[in-house]
Image (cartoon, helix red, strand yellow):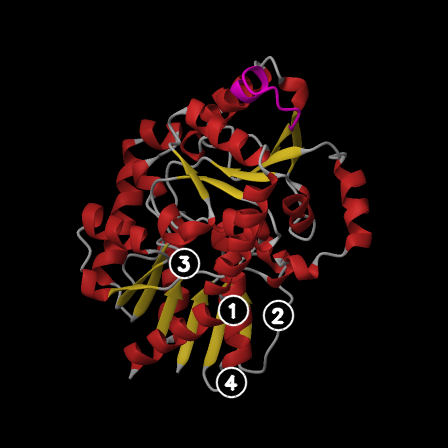
Amino acid sequence: MKIAIDARFYRSSTGGIGRYTRALIRELMKIDKKNDYTIYITSKDEKEYNLDAPNFSVKVVPISHYSVNEQIKFLQILNKEKFDLVHFTNFNHPIFYSGKFVVTIHDLTIMLFPTINQQKSILKKFAFNSVMQNAVLKSEKIIAISEATKADVVKYLKGDSAKIKVIYEGIDNKYQIKNIDYKKNGIIKEKYQITDPYILFVSQWRPHKGLPELIKAFEILKEKYRLKHKLVLVGKPNLDFPEIIKRINSSKYINDIILPGFVADDDLPYIYHNADAFIFPSQYEGFGLPPLEAMAAGTVVVSSKTSCMPEILGDAAIYFNPRNPSDIAEKLADVLSNNKMQKDFIKKGLIHIKKYSWENMARETLKLYESICG
């Protein structure tokens, strides 16, 4: 087969989609030696692309996501190559492409939680929804990364349940507690100046990720439960949501909130490992990699009980209502004051993460390619 993979989300700054794309290509290189692959990346991805295999070729295209050129120039490139199958690793694709293609839909955030700019622009909203609807309608198969995402595609996009394949994501080995280098651990603490006991948040800074509720919960922890922990918020402010950084800065406990900014992937396992608890207050997710990474690093996970989280985290997390700061604070206080509870959930987490493997993800994806091309 002659297969193309749209890897224009390859770079680490693209978050979960980038991690998914990097893992898919890396694992396919290990298990598939017979099919020919063309990997499309942008110049922004090129400096991070360090993979190589005889049956994989890389092409750099000056075509950004969600652009007019994606619909025109990328379409021309794909039509010229005449691939047996194209895998778009996100919903965005040239809507007039007539060849066989697979699309991965990670979640419906753009539809259900649009940014202010997306809400203001009727044209943008229409364009995003049209491209996503076209992907659902015209693709040979849809890969959903959870049963929750599959249900959303069926409910909101009227997707055909029979053509949606749920393939879970995996966890990079570097997050595993067995790979923590304790000599480097001290260096990381010094680098980010995070030495006090702390609660950790890792995610995008958007309202539906639960940051406003988390800040309120942290204030309750300080006032009602007298906890001495700091709150570490990994990530960077989103210009579309200035109210979040304003809420952080207006907290009376701003001196106990640590903002390290963007943390490099190689440093993140140590930030996870050193936390007393990982907090995930998101109100909506497609899969939720950060809490699984925290579990792998040996950290207890306290998560919202909504969207896909009970499906993905099972009985290895402590759950709360993400819209209730008092409940968030209570669950955090319970686990932070109970060493036995922490140890029990850390043990559960280390067992639970064995369910998820990037290799299995790639093998199931390859099977899907082969079933389509016969």
Packing grade of label 3 (10 A; few <14, some 14-19, many >=20) is some
The type of residue carrying mark 4 is Lys
Question: Which circle marks residue 203 in the picture?
Answer: none
Badge 1: few (under 14), some or many (20 or more) residues near its Cα, within 10 Å?
Answer: some
Q: Is residue 150 above or below residue 236?
A: below
Label pair 2/1, CB-CB below 8 angstroms: yes
Q: Quadrant of the C terminus?
A: bottom left
**Which residue is identified by label 3?**
73
Q: Which element type, helix, strand or loop, lies under badge 4?
A: loop
Q: CA distance from mark 3 to mark 1?
A: 23 Å
Going by the image, does 50 lie left or right of 223? right
> Which of pointers 2 and 4 lies earlier in the amino acid sequence?
4
Residue under the image location 26 percent in, 48 percent down: 152
Q: Nearer the viewer, mark 4 or mark 3?
A: 4
* Residue farthest to the bottom, as pictured: 34
**Mark seen at residue 51:** 2
- Within-10-Å neighbours for mark 2: few <14, some 14–19, many 20+: few
Q: Which of the labelled discs sits on residue 25, or is there none?
A: 1
Secondary element under disc 1, as helix, strand or loop, is helix
Q: Which residue is mark 4?
A: 33
| Residue toward you, 63 or 316 | 316
- Mark 2–mark 1 distance (CA, rounded to whole Å): 8 Å
How many tags in the picture?
4
Task: Please tell me whether the stretch drawn in magenta is mainly helix, strand or loop.
Answer: loop
| Residues rendered magenta in the picture | 220-229
| Residue 204 on image: x %, y % | 51, 38
Q: CA distance from mark 2 to mark 3?
A: 26 Å
Q: Secondary structure at mark 2?
A: loop
Between tags 3 and 1, which lies in front? 1
